[in-house]
Image (tube, rainbow, N blue to C red):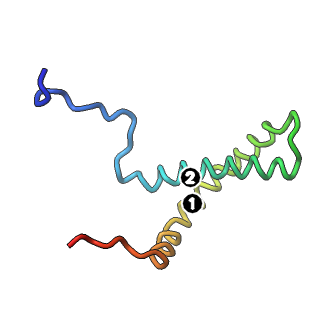
Amino acid sequence: MSDSTALPARRGLKFGHRATPYVFAFFMAGIMAMLMCLVITAAHAGVDAAYLGRVLEAYLLAMPVAFCCVLVVRPLVLRLVALTVHPPERNR
């Protein structure tokens, strides 16, 4: 089978490009919420046998809150970045 007759590659489980802000917010919120839960739980209650349970309990609240916050704050952050970073120079 030649390259010109090959079937297109499967897209898999990918979202369309319009979902980018939401997918970004989901991953950013998930990672940051988990890191913050790990650190704050350790600082507040210490690391013992119940540590991971307390972290996961905190994460159940923190993740959806963080997701909503990232969605709300994103436009402000984009504007602040645009005000403080030079755009790339265009090739002429």
> Label for residue 20?
none
Give whichever of 87, 50 is nearer the camera.
87
Q: Is residue 2 above or below residue 17?
A: above
Q: Which residue is label 2 attached to?
A: 28
Position in image of residue 53 (x %, y %): 79, 37
Position in image of residue 8 (x %, y %): 21, 32
Q: Are marks 1 and 2 in contact (CB under 8 Å)?
A: yes
Position in image of residue 82 (x %, y %): 44, 75
Is disc 1 surrounded by few (<14), some (14 to 19) or many (20+) residues within 10 Å? some
The residue sitting at 64% across, 49% down in the picture is 63
- In the drawing, does residue 90 fall left or right of residue 83? left
Give the mark, 1 or 2, whose residue is nearer the N terminus.
2
Classify the position of the C terminus by image quarter. bottom left
Q: Which kind of residue does numbered mark 2 sit on? A: Met
Q: Which residue is label 1 attached to?
A: 70
Instruction: Point out the frontmost of discs 1 and 2.
Output: 2
The residue sitting at 34% across, 47% down in the picture is 16
- In the drawing, does residue 85 fall left or right of residue 70? left
The residue sitting at 54% across, 48% down in the picture is 27
